[in-house]
Amino acid sequence: MNKVQIEITIPHLFRCPISLDLFEDPVTLSTGQTYDRSNIVQWLDAGNLTCPVTMQKLHDSSIVPNHTLRHLIDQWLQLCHQFDTGNSETIDYLASLKHTLQSHDSTLENKVQALGKIRVLSDEYCSFKKSCFIKLSFLSLLLELVFGTEYAKLSKNHMELKELALSCIINFLPLVSLEPLNMIKDESKLATFMHLFEKGTISMKISLCNLIESTASSSKTEEVCYMLGNTNKLVHDIVLFCHKKFELSKAAIKAISALCSLESNKESLVRAGAIDGVIRYISGCERKQKNLAALGMSIIEKLLVLESAKEALVNNPNGVETLVKMVFMVCNQECSEGSVEVLLIICGDFRSAREEAIGAGVLTQLLFLMQSQCATKTKTKARMLLKLLRSKWTEESKQV
């Protein structure tokens, strides 16, 4: 069956409006439109703040997994004729690649070649071949290839194999149950994870950050998320990655956001310098990355439930000034609302933060924001911050 024939079998509602391919990880915007996660994230990362289908302005760029649609697609794939005998050649070919990876008689070179073919196939149109990978249960095998070898024995060729396997894993994660990721809880496999995170290529580090992000998306991998979030060296390294080149820093900031989803991880993140790392990331965001600044702002907001996080933010020499600069963001209202929310918290608790915010021009920024086309919710918070600054200034003037 060729590509055109395969795509004709896909129901219209199962196609992403952007790629026109079968949904892999359907997520829904505030407009009610559903897209494949990778496609809509790429759209938003490019600085677009509208819904691609309706062209409505997004006052809230958050995305919510569409579990119902994903379940329907899973059922359809199981019943679909894509697994009929007419496709047995493809199934047999993938099965032979799997055998090569499993066999103790296969050389390392043969396994690398097999993974290269799997990588090419997994990158192709998703509707058929990725479904075959699921049917043949590739994920557990690939995870074992990546984390099953003691890191002391890793050669250059072993690292190449692991890099290829990791890239395939990331392609499969949106489609499958994440339970196999629980193998990382094993002490030896966690040690290998840490070694790859420290010594691996940029591509491997990005893939591992993506894997960390995935552990926070399912209750079945909550223990893994907790273990990774409380591994001090790992968290410290992720924070350092926030200062690296765009793709790695983007993956790192998303990994930190994912780890923040567990309350039990927040103390570890603050100790590792997450506040300073995120502030530096936000202040260094280029125009095309401004929507990721909003993600950074949401991380800070989540961490501010801890007094230690508030102190870290106030003590950061660029912390308050960076927040003030984000108050009036014409192209990113989510970032504006987040910065106002964070300033409300720290300006309410710290006189030094209030003084620094006023000195950095927060009053002007707030007035501009209130005169803009921002959401009513954002304007309400801006008024609350103005009222707070005015009342605190009045109180402190009387005390003097």
Image (cartoon, rainbow, N blue to C red):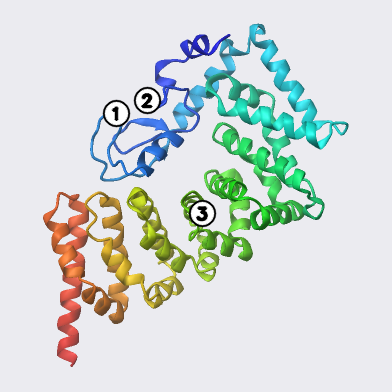
Label 2, on which residue? 17
Q: Earlier in the sequence, mark 1 or mark 3?
A: 1
Residue at x 63% of width, y 35% of height: 168
- Total count of labels: 3
Mark 3: amino acid: Ala
The location of residue 162, given as percent across then percent down, is: 70, 43
Element type at marker 2?
loop
Q: Which mark is residue 252?
A: 3
The location of residue 112, given as percent across then percent down, is: 74, 35
Residue at x 27% of width, y 38% of height: 50
Residue at x 48% of width, y 65% of height: 274
Mark 2: amino acid: Pro
The location of residue 284, given as percent across then percent down, is: 38, 60
Residue 151 is left or right of residue 49, and the answer is: right
- Location of residue 106 with respect to 287 vertically, above or below: above
Residue at x 78% of width, y 50% of height: 154
Mark 1: amino acid: Val
Residue 137 is left or right of residue 297, and the answer is: right
How many C-alpha atoms fall within 10 Å of the one at disc 1: few (<14), some, or many (≥20)?
Answer: few
* Mark 3 and mark 2: Cα distance apart in space: 28 Å
Residue found at the very far top of the displayed protein:
86
Residue found at the very far right of the displayed protein:
105
Q: Which mark is residue 206?
A: none
Element type at marker 1?
loop
**Quadrant in which the N terminus appears:** top right
Q: Earlier in the sequence, mark 2 or mark 1?
A: 2
Label 1, on which residue? 53
